[in-house]
Amino acid sequence: MKLLLLSGGSGKRLWPLSNDINSKQFIRLLDDGQGAKQSMIERVFSQLSDMQLDRDAFILTNAHQRDAIVYQIGTDANIITEPSRRDTFPAIVLGASYLNEQRVDPNETVLVMPVDAYVDLRFFEYFPQVDEAVQASDDALHLIGVTPLHPTSKYGYIVPDETAQISSVRLFQEKPTVDVAEQLIEQGALWNCGIFACKLHLLLDELTERNLPTTYSELTSRYDDLEKTSFDYAVVEHAESVFVHRYDGDWKDLGTWNTLTEEMTSTTHGQVDLFESTNTHVINELNLPLIGIGLEDLVVAVNADGILVSTKDATPQLKDYLASSDDYPKFKWKRWGQSEVIHHETLADGHHSVTRRMLVQAGKELSYHYHEATDTIWTMLQGMATVTIDGQSFEAKPTDVISIQRGAAHTLKAHEDVVFIEVQYSNDWTLDDACPVPSPLDKQY
């Protein structure tokens, strides 16, 4: 069985900590059980590893999130990159084309799930049962439905034909009103947790029916020919043979602040002092003290991208208020570490200044590149590194100041964890005018 894990999302429901690049699955607020914080994707991969499923898991994502995945999961992660950001149907059939190009048996079971599912380990123990059911029927889709805890309009619903452990599906209902949800639950409806499985050839057939190639190398060049729609709408709701497997354990979508804070083991994160407050969570990612007094039923989240103060009940509507926001994300996970914009401004002479705090992990290296319209200064704060500028290498240590003129190709390799401040002075407000060049150390860009 192969797993296709969907990693995408705009990140707006957990603003300001999440954004288009640092989506909710990468936010480290969950307890890992050993005193450290982990993200949703790290938690899922830890569970997959416990079940020995991680080697057969492939992450479908966009180019903007690839570095975050490599940083948190490691270079061994199987990553399938979309040529452009679309919807779940294009992403899933693209994943199928990749498996086909890797010569996976067309009769192999493919199970698709979101990468940020918040479940206990028992959930993954259902997967072999689903695999067995898929193998017993050639052309059927198999879903996992969760026994609802309460009526809600947050989730879609699956109404089975009967109350058996495995049942054929009678109908689907997308995010109904609470009143309709109550009626559906009375009919035995299950929450749709966005997980389905089938044989690989069923996904490839969807491409063939649309006269599109079934290999990844060919499909990427025609990716925009695929309809931008959800897999549920394009395939599941029109399939003739659909079964649902009933799961009665814990499952939760941590897509909003009110649900995420329910799983946080502490009411505060970062430099926070909270006094005389009830049912309030405060998350502070700035290097500044934050004091809360007399707060009730609130979420307060602060980082370089902004400040959120909201009642918990109102947080599911946060995305509606950010619909027109296109601010450049200040924080980025990189394959080599982290980058955070700590100051930017337009100067009186019309030039632009951007200051970043950079963390490069031991043994990691920046890509070898130059800037067309930007002069750069690095001030080393921590760690030893080899810096290369236009093919000339030298050692850098804390307090060293390194000037890099526009047009000069440069890179840095960390011998230990390195922290430095980068100040860029540019003609244009581009924030990123880096141009790759072949590395003198023969490293792939």
Image (cartoon, helix red, strand yellow):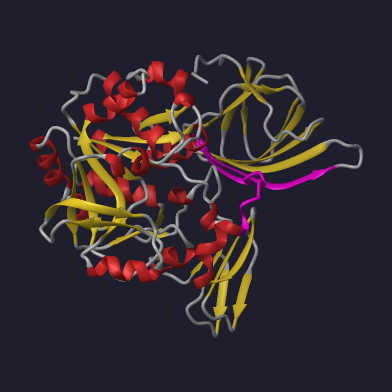
Segment tinted magenta in the rendering: 321-346
Residue drawn at point x = 37 percent, y = 47 percent: 41
In the picture, the quarter occupied by the N terminus is top left
**Which is more toward the observer, 251 or 187?**
187
Q: Is residue 250 toward the left or the right of residue 326 in the image?
A: left
Is residue 179 in view from this perspective?
yes
- Residue 209: which quarter of the image? top left
**Which is more toward the observer, 46 or 102?**
102
Can you give x and y, in whole percent of width and height, for residue 146 in the image?
24, 59
Q: Is residue 275 toward the left or the right of residue 69 in the image?
A: right
Is residue 362 in view from this perspective?
no
Residue drawn at point x = 24 percent, y = 62 percent: 189
Can you give x and y, in whole percent of width and height, for residue 385 in the image?
57, 31
* Vertical position of residue 297 compared to residue 226: above or below: below
**Which is more toward the observer, 319 or 431?**
319
Residue drawn at point x = 11 percent, y = 36 percent: 137
Can you give x and y, in whole percent of width and height, for residue 273 in the image?
57, 75
- Residue 296: which quarter of the image? bottom right
Residue drawn at point x = 79 percent, y = 34 percent: 425
Query: What is the number of callouts on the image?
Result: 0
Can you give x and y, in whole percent of width and height, for residue 12 in the image?
55, 53
- Residue 435: which quarter of the image? top right
